[in-house]
Image (tube, helix red, strand yellow):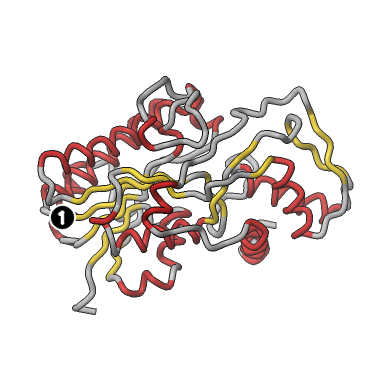
């Protein structure tokens, strides 16, 4: 154990953090992953002291206040302030402690609302953001820019940002009040199958396209990046490079669950952006692609859903 490098992982209790901890490659690191009850990342003094005590070789900042569109609209101050403080405190504490390598996790919410698909990293800050999650996006952009500035001032600090697309997988939230698209579909279709309902509603016409990455695959990319921080671009998307329609996600979930009912479309409901697809040119040049096919990922997520008592 003494020969292992120490990795400080923030957000160890969240979906991304827990998938990182579950990944086989995590065993090669001495990982310290404090929960929020152990360390309040919005407390600058506490974070400075913790970083100085732990003395990690690498920091992965995966913590954040996250939520769906309704939570972002209802609590813009908290989404901006909490994420701003967490990003600033973790990154600056690492710099102050002399930690030379840091991987900051961003979000595709950082991209302009009208950015051309596929989304390229250089388009960040070129146009206005999506208003419904602007606070969260601004905080994430600040953290990414702070990493850029630190590298610019001193090239010995390899502080890089990974920008994952939408995620699904083990440790996700399936409660319809809080869940995102894929877990929401799993829950909805499972309940229809369980109760004998033969009709499931889809908002809009189902043609809007979304890119969803299996969370275990993101963990794979993060731990590969942990071994090659110097080789990373300053900011790099992590995604599939292709997307699927909302109708496709419903159809695959129904196939996995074994529900043979029919879908109906409510054209009066909002559907959001028609497409949000990441460019994976930098990721491909770096030598990584997502290993899990969509159907396999959904099957594994459904198995987790059943085994973890969400059903």
Does residue 78 sit above or below 7 in this rendering? above
- Element carrying mark 1: loop
Q: Residue at x 33, y 43 (%)?
A: 235
Q: In front: 5, or 184?
A: 5
In the rendered view of the protein, which quadrant contains the C terminus? bottom right
Q: Residue at x 27, y 56 (%)?
A: 231
Q: In front: 262, or 8?
A: 262
Q: Residue 82 appears in which quarter of the rendering?
A: top left
Q: In front: 117, or 201?
A: 117
In the displayed structure, does residue 90 sit left or right of residue 64? left
In the rendered view of the protein, which quadrant contains the N terminus? bottom left
Label 1: few (<14), some (14–19) or many (≥20) C-alpha neighbours in 10 Å: many
In the displayed structure, does residue 25 sit left or right of residue 311? left
The residue to which callout 1 is attached is: 99
Looking at the picture, how far across and down is residue 63, in whole percent? 36, 48
Q: In front: 154, or 75?
A: 154
Looking at the picture, how far across and down is residue 184, in whole percent? 66, 45
Looking at the picture, how far across and down is residue 49, in whole percent? 15, 52
Looking at the picture, how far across and down is residue 198, in whole percent? 89, 47
Q: Residue at x 17, y 47 (%)?
A: 93
Does residue 24 sit above or below 248 in this rendering? below
In the displayed structure, does residue 223 sit left or right of residue 230? right
Q: Residue at x 32, y 60 (%)?
A: 33
Number of numbered discs on residues: 1
């Amino acid at each position: 154990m003494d020969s292992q490098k120490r990795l400080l992982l923030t957000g160890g209790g969240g979906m991304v953090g827990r998938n990182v901890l579950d990944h086989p490659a995590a065993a090669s690191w001495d990982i310290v992953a404090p929960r929020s009850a152990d360390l309040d990342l919005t407390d600058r003094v506490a974070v400075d002291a913790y970083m100085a005590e732990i003395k990690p070789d690498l920091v992965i900042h995966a913590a954040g206040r996250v939520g769906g569109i309704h939570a972002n609209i209802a609590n813009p101050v908290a989404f901006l302030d909490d994420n701003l403080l967490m990003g600033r405190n973790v990154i600056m504490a690492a710099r102050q402690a002399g930690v030379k390598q840091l991987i900051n996790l961003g979000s595709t919410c950082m991209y302009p609302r009208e950015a051309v698909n596929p989304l390229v990293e250089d388009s960040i800050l070129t146009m206005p953001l999506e208003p419904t999650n602007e606070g969260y996006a601004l905080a994430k952009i600040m953290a990414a820019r702070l990493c850029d500035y630190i590298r610019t001032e001193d090239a010995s600090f390899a502080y890089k940002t990974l920008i994952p697309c939408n995620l699904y997988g083990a440790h996700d939230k399936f409660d319809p009040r809080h869940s995102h698209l894929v877990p929401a579909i799993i829950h909805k279709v499972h309940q229809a199958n369980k109760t004998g309902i033969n009709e499931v509603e889809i908002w809009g016409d189902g043609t809007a396209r979304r890119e969803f990455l299996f969370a275990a695959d993101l963990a794979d990319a993060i731990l590969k990046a942990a071994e090659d921080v110097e080789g990373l671009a300053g900011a790099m998307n992590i995604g599939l490079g292709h997307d699927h329609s909302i109708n496709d996600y419903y159809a695959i979930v129904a196939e996995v669950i074994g529900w043979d009912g029919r879908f109906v479309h409510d054209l009066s409901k909002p559907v959001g952006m028609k497409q949000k697809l990441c460019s994976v040119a930098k990721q491909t040049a770096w030598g990584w692609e997502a290993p899990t096919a969509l159907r396999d990922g959904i099957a594994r997520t459904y198995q987790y859903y059943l085994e973890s008592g969400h059903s």
